[in-house]
Image: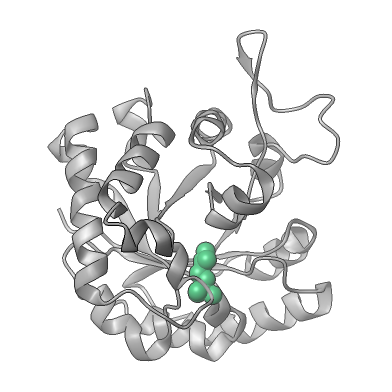
Amino acid sequence: MARKKFIAGNWKENGLLAEAKQLVQELIPLVKDITTADIAVCPPYLAIPAVHELIDGTNIQLGAQNAFSTEAKGALVQKGAYTGEVSPAMLKDAGCQWVILGHSERRQYFGETDEKVNVKVRACYEAGVKPIVCVGETLEERDGGKTASVVEKQIRGCLAGLPADRMAETVIAYEPVWAIGTGRTATPDQAQEVHAQIRGLLTELFGKDTAEAVRIQYGGSMKPDNAAELLAQPDIDGGLIGGASLKAGDFAAIIDAAK
Ligand code: 13P
């Protein structure tokens, strides 16, 4: 089965309202004729309503960068006394189709764990929002020869016990931490090796048909000049773009490379 490429922009903590609107207004005409890839932008929460309105009727989909849920009294929390948090159900209500979970910056700065991500994924399924689950090793782990074991632990933890019939709508993003925002991209071979490993794990956990349907994005300094060769790898099904998604022309060029 051919997997449609999926390019998503993670704006991170960037974009005052006026900037967010301008960015998306510049992007819309640049990508309007693209049918070969799915496209999404993930603005900061506060810009979501404005971006939602602007992309209505276009080929750009909407995502968020995080969501909160936990288990309480045997149920997945979608609302309640959790000051400062936003649930998958709220994101769905705001027009989001996607949510990034387990990004390395959330793991590093906000105590995100595989177990927490697992609960959030299930809450996303319940709410009807599709998760983009991020995994990836640090430089120290790569240099220590631990890449495969770190990624395996993250995949098994984040996806533990999930129903196979929901996995195909889940996206995995392999983002080596040492490549994020550093300008140091994984080589196509380095990325492909880990993507193939992830697909092997998905096969073991959910069966071959499901594993073949799941899209695995690469993230980490993906730019217009390296996107094509990364996206040409057999198990790289798209990109999760940070810095380059903040420039409409660069983001559009990456999307254009996903043919
Ligand atoms: P950069 O593209 O800025 O390296 O960020 C990648 C990323 O973290 C996307 O989630």
Q: In the depicted view, which residue is nearer to us: 231 or 115?
A: 115
Left/right of residue 27 with respect to residue 145 in the rendered view: right
Q: Quadrant of residue 154?
A: top left
Q: Is residue 17 above or below residue 102?
A: below
Which percent across, then down, holds residue 92? 64, 42
User: Residue 168: x and y, percent?
Assistant: 31, 41
Residue drawn where x is 39% and y is 44% of the image: 170
Q: Where is residue 3 in the image (x, y as percent from the top left)?
A: 24, 58
Instruction: Give the residue at x 56% y 32%.
Output: 116
Which residue in the rendered view is the most extreme toward the front? Answer: 144
Q: Residue 74, image x and y in percent?
A: 61, 9
Query: Which image quadrant is residue 78 in?
Result: top right
Q: Tell me if residue 174 can be seen.
A: no
Residue 57 or 204: which is nearer the viewer?
204
Residue at position x 67%, y 81% from top?
23
Q: Which of 56 and 37 is in front in this view?
A: 37
Residue at left offset 45%, top offset 69%: 178
